[in-house]
Image: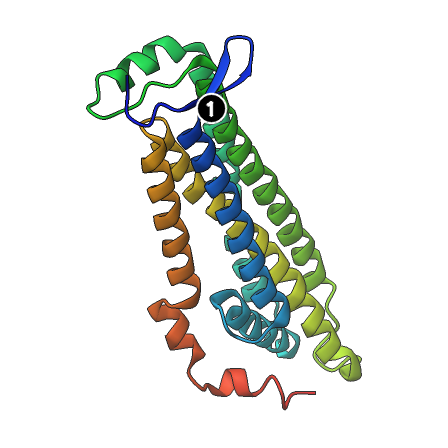
Amino acid sequence: MPPFDFSLPLGPDVTINVLDLAAFAWFGMAWFFYSEISHRHHVSHTSENLLSIMHQYRVQWMRQMLKRESRIPDMTGVGNLIRSVSFFGSTSIFLVLGSIGLLGYSEQAQGVIRAIPYAVPPSPFVWELKVALLIIVFVHAFFKYTWSLRLFNYLTIYVGAAPGTHEHLEQHEAYAQRGAEMMTTAARHFNLGLRAYYYGFAIISWFFHPLAFIITTTVVIWVLYRREFLSGTYFTLKRDDPVLLRKTTAA
């Protein structure tokens, strides 16, 4: 009998290990609460995380764009962002297809897991649950990437439709704020897609042991938090900078 083999019956010939259930619940709560914490800092624009700080630089970008006679550099910058999002969006499709393929090779995959020391071979129901969760996470990433891609395409039109350098000067600040908000929303969805990849790596550890899943989920959340709130890039950008200070004086 493998360790921690405390199974709950869910139906005829369907059981789930209590530790698997706890690991699944911990993963769901960690994802939900971290997303809520990050989102609250984002919408407050308090510069308490990396995304909020970058929003101020995006505002400054849009202000500088309105001062330029040529918008080619801005179109080039948005185009580079679009290519990055497109690459990850395409990758997520292959990850979904690969995860679906696991359902057809479950016996071979479980045989590999049984050969690993301390690994806990799952029941057929739990195996399908793990694969289904992996598929859901990568599908979630796909939808985040594709929405981010659409927003960046809309931003291209927005930049192209911007008023001229000497036209409607009274509307320039509001136009810059709206453009920056659109760009930040696109970046936030791209960031959510990247997070899903991190969570996908955590789920892979569940195939070997539920305790490994709990530990890996905790490590992933810590890595995400550290990079968004405690990274060297965050503290570098948080320093008092004329670009950030101009956000309160520009009008």
The residue drawn where x is 37% and y is 37% is 213
Residue 157 as seen in the image, left or right of residue 109: right
Dot 1: element:
helix
Q: Nearer the viewer, residue 248 or 13?
A: 13
Q: Report if residue 110 is visible in the image.
A: yes
Vertical side of 217 occupied by 46: above or below: below
Q: Nearer the viewer, residue 46 or 162?
A: 46
Vertical side of 159 occupied by 132: above or below: above
Q: Please name the residue that numbered disc 1 is placed on.
A: 131
- Specify the amino acid type for callout 1: Val
Snapshot quadrant of residue 182:
bottom right
The N terminus is located in which quarter?
top left
Extreme left residue here?
A: 117
Vertical side of 109 occupied by 221: above or below: below
Where is residue 192? Give x, y as percent.
53, 49
The residue drawn where x is 61% and y is 67% is 71
Where is residue 167? Give x, y as percent.
78, 79
Snapshot quadrant of residue 240:
bottom left
